[in-house]
Each structure stands twice: as C-alpha cells, then as structure tokens.
Amino acid sequence: MAQLYLAPMEEVTGYLFRQTLQSAFGGVDTYFTPFLSPVTGCAFKTRQGRELDPSHNAGMNTVPQVLTNDADAAVTMFQLLADLGYREVNLNFGCPSGTVVKKGRGSGFLRDPEGMERFFDRLFSHELPMPVSVKTRLGYADAQAEWPRILEIYNRYPITELIVHARVREDWYGGKPDMDAFAYAYENTKLPLCYNGDITSAEGCAKILERFPDLKAVMIGRGAVANPGIFREIATGEVMTDAELRAFHDALYRAYVGLWGVKDTLFKMKEVWGYLGDRYPDAERAKKHIRKCRSEAEYLVAAAELLGK
C-alpha cells in the first residue's frame, strides 16, 4: 500500500488543522507544512516558529516545506530545521502564486532549467544535515515541451522523493491533471515517486494506484479539506459520518478561536469552507451566509445549517 500524505496548503493546513485531523481521524503517514521561506539570523519568525514548534507536531511525522531559489539560504535553513529535530525537508517547486512566481521561486523556477541545475549543484555540494525531497509541477506552461528536461534534471541529483502535482503552473488548479505526463515520470525515473492532484475520494485514490502500482505515496490536499476522513477511509474503508465531521469542525473552530480570536477565525474558517463546501452542492444559500457572516453568532448558525445541530 502506498503511503498517504497531507499536502501543504497555505493558510489552510497549518499545525492546528493537522493536529485536529490527526486526533479525529488519523490515517496520514506524513504531514507537510505550508511553505516556509528561509530566515536570516538564527530564529524563525513568529508564524514559522509556531508551525515548526516540535510540541505542535508531536505524534505526527511532519516534513517542513521550504520555498527558495537560493541554495545557500536553503542550507542554512536546513540546519535550523535539523536543530529542531526534523529529519527531512521538502523543496517547493510547485507554488503557482503570482508573487512567488515573479521572484523565480515555486513553479516560477521551472522556467529556468539552467538556474535549477546551478541551484542543485550548489545545494548538493554541501554536506546536508537531512534528506531532501522535491514537490514539483510538470513545467510552467507546456508539459510536453518542458517536463522531459525538468525530470532529467531531477534524475541527476540525490533527491529522496519526487512529489509531482500533475499540472503546469499555467493550469493553476483548473482543468484535469495531465496523466500522460505523469506516466512519463513513472516510466523515466528511479526516484521514489508520489502522485498529487485531484484525489477527492477513496475510489479516486484506488484508480491512481491501479494505474501506477509502484508509487511510493499519494498526496491529497483539497480533497482532504473537503473530506477530512479521506485518509482513514482509504486506509481502513471506514467512511466519515456526519457526526464525525461536525465534531471535527467544532474542534477546529475552538482551536482557531483559542489562537487567533473570533475575527481572524471567521476568515480562516471561510478558507476551509472554500473546500468543505463542495460537500454541499445544493446548499448555496447556507454557504453564502458563511461567506458573508461577520459575527460568531452568524457563523455558527450558518455552519449548523450545513453540518446539523
């Protein structure tokens, strides 16, 4: 059985979400943090510090994800992470955000194969304190034209695992994953391979593994926010109940309020409902109430309309 990974999603799968999912359902072999940028000096910023606090990740196999195109900055951050006790790090070559891409990072780095080569040459010239995996897209605009060259670059370096989101940057999250381009990777790399992209059900996961039986892992992001019980369901067949979803929601809400207070929590819960709302395609009125609510009372009434009392 392939391992099951929770994808890193900025503003969504932070440590409180990971803790709540682990407590409610489990089933995740490895959790990946939303991307972290290298720091200057010897201390992490407050938000990063909370994400990386070992006590916030206790009992979970957690891998920090780093976003950079600067090999020396990456090495410095890897050492800081090792000092905190982390045993693996993941590099983000997949984020499609405009501000990230403009700086030549994330999937923006995929436009510069020569720069990628220089980055990896420099990175692996160091004695690194931990193994390094990569999460990537298939290219910037055209997988057929770009992906063979990018994959050939990855194949030359001691990357411990290649996590492939089967889209190019210009796809963002639209359209369908390019399964033929992913199949090219499956057939042309000896790196341990993980599939990522549009797994929204246990049945969908089974289809991926039927086509690619030697995958090391599958990674689920948006599908896991819409169905927090998906990992347990894949692993054991036990389907999440409505009561379990309500309990998960309530625990997550309380955790958010305890850290951020009600105002910021409402914003964060609206982010979660951007995916969780897919479970309720015929409840546009209630979902609109959630998007527009400005008080705790309004939010709780709208959430209860969807989740049940």
Image: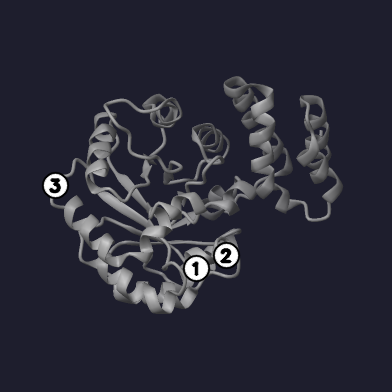
Residue 290 position in % (x across, y down): 78, 39
Kindly tell me whether residue 2 is visible in this rendering.
no
- What's the distance in space between the residues labelled 3 and 1, CA to CA? 36 Å
- What's the distance in space between the residues labelled 2 and 3, CA to CA? 40 Å
Q: Please, which residue is most extreme toward the front here?
A: 102
Rendered image: mark on residue 204: 2
Residue 284 position in % (x across, y down): 83, 50
To which quarter of the image does residue 86 belong? Answer: top left
User: Which residue in the structure is indicated by mark 3?
Assistant: 126
Q: Nearer the viewer, residue 192 or 33?
A: 33
Q: Residue at x 80, y 35 (%)?
A: 304
Q: What colour scheme does the image use? A: one colour
Q: Please, which residue is most extreme toward the right here?
A: 285
Q: Is residue 54 left or right of residue 97?
A: left
Kindly tell me whether residue 99 is visible in this rendering.
yes
Rendered image: mark on residue 208: 1
Q: Residue at x 37, y 63 (%)?
A: 110
Q: Is residue 161 left or right of residue 179?
A: left
Q: Is residue 196 left or right of residue 193?
A: right
Residue 133 position in % (x across, y down): 31, 53
